[in-house]
Amino acid sequence: MQSKDSFITFVFRPSILIILAVIALTGCRYPVNIERPMADMQGGELNIGLSENPPWVINTDQGPAGLEVEIIQALAENMGATINWHWGSEGNLLAALSQYQLDLVIGGLTQDSNVSALAAPTKAYYQSHYSVGVPEGASLPSNLEGIEVAIPAVNHIAHALRKEGAVPRPTSELGTLDQAVANPSWWLRAHGYQVGDWEIATDHHVMALPNGENAWMLAVQRHLNSYPDIEQNLQRLEADQ
Amino acid sequence: MKIRKLYHLPPDKQQDLNYLIRLEWWNLAFRISIVSVLALVLGNSQAMKVAWLEDMLSLIPPIAFLLAVRFRKRPPNETYPYGYQRATIIAFLCTATALSAMGLFLLGDSLLKLVHQEHPSIGAITLFGETIWMGWVMVGVLIYSVIPPVIIGRLQTKAAAKVHEKTVFADGKMSKADWMTGMAAIVGVLGVGAGFWWADAAAAAIIALDVTKDGITNLKEAVGDLLDRRPHFTSREKPEYMEEALEAELRAMPWVAAASVRLREEGPIFSGEAFVTPHSNDDLARHLKEASQHLNNYDWRIYEVVVTAWPNEEHIPSPANATPP
């Protein structure tokens, strides 16, 4: 019993007091970042890594564009910060992020172990639902059994399509076809397809932050959650290409 | 073949046991609720992970106890002539092994995170349209996770001491101390929020140390029972000295010249042998049987003491240091 009492007197009570004191000192600025203080980012420079992945991140002659670029530009504007863009491959950018050389990495990243191994992903701010669409005017089939479906030449949905009984046909130019096509619903709508209600696959879109930057994470997450009309913006960006 | 009779608790103790069983069902229900709620908010925090795994492991003792009391109701049979009283201890040994191994693993894992200087990310959660820091939710859940175990732990130790259920008693003692690990996790999470990357892994290491300590304490208890250690009462560290009491009972019988007794723990109850040197061999078989019956009714915890006759010259009296101080 004595050791328990001394534990409470010498370890437990002081540590609670210290924690309360820290919370009181930091006030409403809780949590705080571990590496780079928020005060340094607010009105300062943000180092954003980006890798091309239209329509999320598009490399144009006028500089970066795309949905995620627009989202981050809006965030930087709210914070009164300027952005230094750093182009690179996803792998290199994530490695740099894990060494706190960057504040954020974008590039149409989705929830997977590659991202979470090196970085702290945000919660999914948007989900791309893959479905099958047919050209305007044609009628949607009642099921996909034996139906030939065009898919991008490089894709991760062929397996899931086959499970539905469809025959996937990898095609290089999808935009102008007169047959069933599988792609995210925003892409299908942007290209004038009628979208069926199949759920072939879902991509959970995230951005990558350095580990332990918990105040920054909260700020980014709040911004993402309040960003309006993501689906419409994707359709607009896709239609413009 | 001589098969033991089924052990029956005295009616008042049976009531105490029934209460303990009900308590363990409540304990299990609360533990499951804690594990489920913690799982929802785990995030990236090592301290949360360790606290969660500790709570997962704490599901085993009540499950093991509830299974074992069912098992113990089976009468001894030709295959198991000594009965099923030790079923609890098997379960207890498994729990203790799991606790020790998991504790050591988590300790290593947490220390590795300290060495690698891993910065834990505690993200945001959207509740009722408001995006808040996940750490606040974690702290709330952790506070919930420490309250039921402390209350149930107190009830458990009291009820378990009444019916000498060592496994439940040990579990109750662990639950009572559980609030400290919960608080350590809270300190870890809040520390990370305050910008100390090491707070989380350090808290996790402390909790892991506590898990290991619990595991080793329980392991000692289980191994003691399996090695036929002399009976200890649930809540005390020291032996029970029931052997000496039984010897006195035997010596008080007019036909007994000398007597010595050894007892072992069989789960919640005691069994053993008594060696008696009679003054004469008259009516010896009847005397022995009556003596055995008398001893078996001496205390509710005694299951079966076999009394045998022993020639005088070979009778070794109990060692002097075994008598109560």
Image (tube, coloured by chain):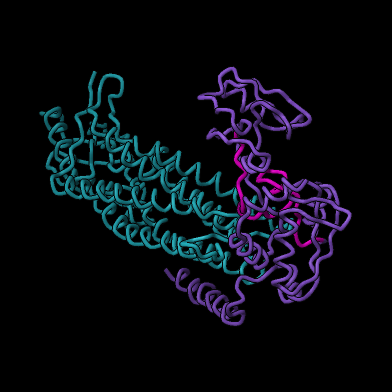
Taking the image as shown, residue A185 lies to the left or right of residue B223, namely right
- What quarter of the picture does the C terminus of chain A occupy? top right
Give B315 or B46, whichever is nearer the viewer: B46
Look at the picture and state if A121 lies above or below A222: above
Residue A112 magenta: yes
Look at the picture and state if A50 lies above or below A215: above
> Residue B236: image x %, image y %?
35, 57
The total number of labels drawn is 0
Taking the image as shown, residue B187 lies to the left or right of residue A207, namely left
Q: Residue furthest front?
A: A137
Magenta stretch in the rendered image: A102-131
Give B317 or B218, whichever is nearer the viewer: B218
Taking the image as shown, residue B270 lies to the left or right of residue A84, namely left
Give B55 or B170, whichever is nearer the viewer: B55
Q: Determine if residue A45 is in view.
A: yes
> Residue B225: image x %, image y %?
39, 41
> Residue B113: image x %, image y %?
68, 55
Look at the picture and state if A27 lies above or below A55: below
Which chain does cyan denote in the image? B
- Which residue is at a point 28% across and 38% down the rendered structure image? B69
Q: Determine if residue B198 is in view.
A: no
Taking the image as shown, residue A240 lies to the left or right of residue B123, namely right
- Which residue is at a point 40% across and 57% down the rendered structure image? B175
> Residue A240: image x %, image y %?
75, 48
- Which residue is at a point 35% across and 47% down the rendered structure image? B28
Q: Residue furthest right?
A: A61
- Which residue is at a point 67% across and 41% down the rendered structure image? A187
Give B46 or A24, whichever is nearer the viewer: A24
Q: Quadrant of residue B301?
A: top left
Q: Quadrant of residue A49?
A: bottom right
Which chain does purple denote in the image? A
Residue A67 magenta: no
